[in-house]
């Protein structure tokens, strides 16, 4: 095990460092096990002259992963496991496939849960939508969405055990961030490969622009694998965790965090509360606030609550006006008329922002712009309000949406159309 890697993991555990480390080398973890740090980590194994990968990274890092792995071992890649079908985990196979073809070797086998194939099919149906939302989330107007995928060669349903050389890979299907997730445990090395089921941030279980996620099932999965006896935990984002006690603590406290949100949300839902009441009432356990692996830097509790409502309660939020609403611009124009014009709404938005109520300011600025979508002065207010909202947020999800909203209005001010279709396109 690399001392540098161990020291890094220790500082992350203590909350002294951010968990992300982007390197260009495979770091030795334990005998025959390596860790390649990237936007999506890859875990490497050597046994009986073979190379095995758990997760293969993003399309942007495939060449670098290949070079790093080849510097670590010349062994031919025989098997790669996908932890799930998100594109930052499944796009590193092309260089290895080409290498096998050039050398006359069999193509490596990709193993994944059967729902990964369904995900790839859905991505084909919603390529345009995924391009839009990921541009917004990652603040990259040039980002494109893939049109082809390296499908698994072998899929499984609930569990699978695969032995190569002296290593046994025990695969478990779990639900959490996705419905197609795989956790792998390698008992001979006491290594637990978590994919995105442990992220070094609060669980990404409420992403407002993505399909259904599974908070209760996520917690159940964490409790299940906490009892396996792992001594090294290698997530596909962020730092390794070393030591059985720390692994158990991280998994069980993350499970507790999720279970608390589930229990609170279901209690209020069963009492007949509206979604609006629930999202402003539910809070994660206060005694876990300081945990470095539960900080809301990517997703956040409020979004998890919304996802739980969608999972258990459907899309109707309890407000009858929202069941069959008027178009947003029509409602905004009516409110603006009552307020004395769209500029009055924009002025009220600035006052609310000045008073520190950015949530109310967002409502008022959005209504003002919808009521008079060509007014550059109102769009300056909207841009200022949503820029302030973005700066006040910790989670990438909220920052992305609010920054994109500000950019829409800035485009109007600059005489351009917004990057994506919006009510303000000319």
Image: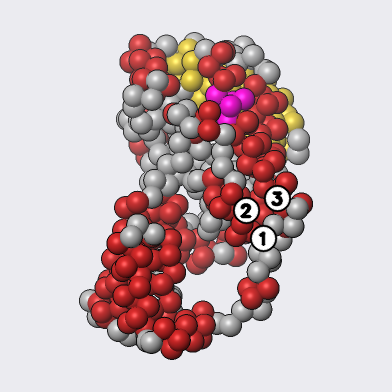
| Cα separation between marks 3 and 2 | 7 Å
Residue under numbered circle 2: 278
**Of helix, strand and loop, which mostly describes the magenta segment?**
helix
Name the residue furthest left: 414
| Cα separation between marks 1 and 2 | 6 Å
User: Which residue is pictured at 47% across the width and 28% down the height?
Assistant: 291
Q: Pointers 3 and 1 in contact (CB under 8 A)?
A: no
Q: Is residue 408 left or right of residue 137?
A: left
Count residues near mark 3 (Cα–Cα under 10 Å), then give few for <14, some for 14-19, many for 20+. some
Nearest the camera: 336 or 312?
A: 336
Nearest the camera: 423 or 157?
A: 423
Quarter of the view holding residue 405: bottom left
Residue under numbered circle 1: 274
Q: Does the image show residue 74?
A: no
Horizontal and vertical percent for residue 418? Answer: 35, 74
Horizontal and vertical percent for residue 151? Answer: 60, 47
Q: Which residues are magenta?
A: 250-254
């Amino acid at each position: 095990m690399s001392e540098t890697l161990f020291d890094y993991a220790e500082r992350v555990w203590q909350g002294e460092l951010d968990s992300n480390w982007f390197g260009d080398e495979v770091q030795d973890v334990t005998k025959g096990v390596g860790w390649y740090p990237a936007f999506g980590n890859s875990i490497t194994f050597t046994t009986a002259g073979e190379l095995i990968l758990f997760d293969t990274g993003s399309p942007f890092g495939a060449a670098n992963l290949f070079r790093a792995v080849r510097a670590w071992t010349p062994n031919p890649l025989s098997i790669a496991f996908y932890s799930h079908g998100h594109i930052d985990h499944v796009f590193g196979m092309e260089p290895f496939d080409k290498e096998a073809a050039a050398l006359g070797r069999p193509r490596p086998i990709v193993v994944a849960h059967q729902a990964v194939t369904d995900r790839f099919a859905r991505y084909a149906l919603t390529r345009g939508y995924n391009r839009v939302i990921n541009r917004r989330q990652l603040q990259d107007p040039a980002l494109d969405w893939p049109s082809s995928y390296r499908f698994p060669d072998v899929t499984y349903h609930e569990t699978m055990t695969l032995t190569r050389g002296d290593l046994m890979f025990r695969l478990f299907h779990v639900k959490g961030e996705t419905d197609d997730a795989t956790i792998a445990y390698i008992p001979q090395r006491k290594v637990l490969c978590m994919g995105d089921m442990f992220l070094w941030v609060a669980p990404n279980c409420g992403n407002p622009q993505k399909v259904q996620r599974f908070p209760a099932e996520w917690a159940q999965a964490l409790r299940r694998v906490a009892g396996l006896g792992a001594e090294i935990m290698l997530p596909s984002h962020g730092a390794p965790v070393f030591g059985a006690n720390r692994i158990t603590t991280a998994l069980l406290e993350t499970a507790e965090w999720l279970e608390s949100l589930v229990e609170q949300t279901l209690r209020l839902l069963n009492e007949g509360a509206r979604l609006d009441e629930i999202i402003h009432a539910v809070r994660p356990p206060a005694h876990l606030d300081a945990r470095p692996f539960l900080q809301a830097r990517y997703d956040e509790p409020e979004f998890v609550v919304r996802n739980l409502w969608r999972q258990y309660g459907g899309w109707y939020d309890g407000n009858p006006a929202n069941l069959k609403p008027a178009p947003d611009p029509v409602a905004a124009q009516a409110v603006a008329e009552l307020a004395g014009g769209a500029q009055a709404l924009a002025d009220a938005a600035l006052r609310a922002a000045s008073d520190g109520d950015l949530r109310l300011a967002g409502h008022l600025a959005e209504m003002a712009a919808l009521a008079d979508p060509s007014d550059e002065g109102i769009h300056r207010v909207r841009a200022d309000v949503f820029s302030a909202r973005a700066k006040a947020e910790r989670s990438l999800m909220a920052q992305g949406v609010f920054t994109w909203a500000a950019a829409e209005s800035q485009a109007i001010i600059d005489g351009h159309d917004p990057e994506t279709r919006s009510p303000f396109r000319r």
